């Protein structure tokens, strides 16, 4: 497609709402996914650390 102005480019031939909302959602998910994965990793690491500490503290009491 050839656009004669920047406004035509952003209008996307009448499909601007669909095109730009899809683009925005894709960018949002690409940014959000690493943040959520980091949170899950941190939570799992803390859980494992607490389990390890509980196990070793109970062994020391024996």
Image: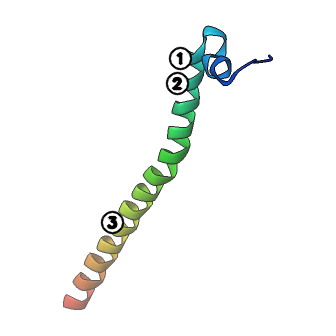
The residue at the point 30 percent across, 83 percent down is 56
Q: Residue 14: give x, y in percent of width and height.
A: 61, 9
Query: Marks 3 and 1, Cα distance to the nearest angstrom?
Result: 43 Å
Task: Please tell me how crowded label 1 is: few (under 14), some (14-19), or many (20+) other residues with Cα within 10 Å.
Answer: few
Residue where numbered disc 1 is placed: 17
Q: Nearer the viewer, residue 30 or 24?
A: 24
Looking at the image, residue 23 lies above or below residue 56: above
Left or right side of 49 for 9: right
The residue at the point 66 percent across, 17 percent down is 8
Q: Nearer the viewer, residue 26 or 60?
A: 26
Identify the image quadrant of the C terminus. Answer: bottom left
Residue 60 seen anywhere in this rendered image of the structure: yes
Residue where numbered disc 3 is placed: 47
Left or right side of 32 for 14: right
The image quadrant that residue 57 belongs to is: bottom left
User: In front of the other: label 3 or label 1?
Assistant: 1
Q: Earlier in the sequence, mark 3 or mark 2?
A: 2
Q: Residue furthest left?
A: 61
Query: Which element is circle 2 on?
Result: helix
Q: Residue 22: give x, y in percent of width and height.
A: 56, 25
Q: Residue 40: give x, y in percent of width and height.
A: 41, 55
Residue where numbered disc 2 is placed: 21
Q: Residue 39: give x, y in percent of width and height.
A: 40, 57
Left or right side of 58 for 14: right
Contact, mark 1 vs mark 2 (Cβ under 8 Å): yes
């Amino acid at each position: 497609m050839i656009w004669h102005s920047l406004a035509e480019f952003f209008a996307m031939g009448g499909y601007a709402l669909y095109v730009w909302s899809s683009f925005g959602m894709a960018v949002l998910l690409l940014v959000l996914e690493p943040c959520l994965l980091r949170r899950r990793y941190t939570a799992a690491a803390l859980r494992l650390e607490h389990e390890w500490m509980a196990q070793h503290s109970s062994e020391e009491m024996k």
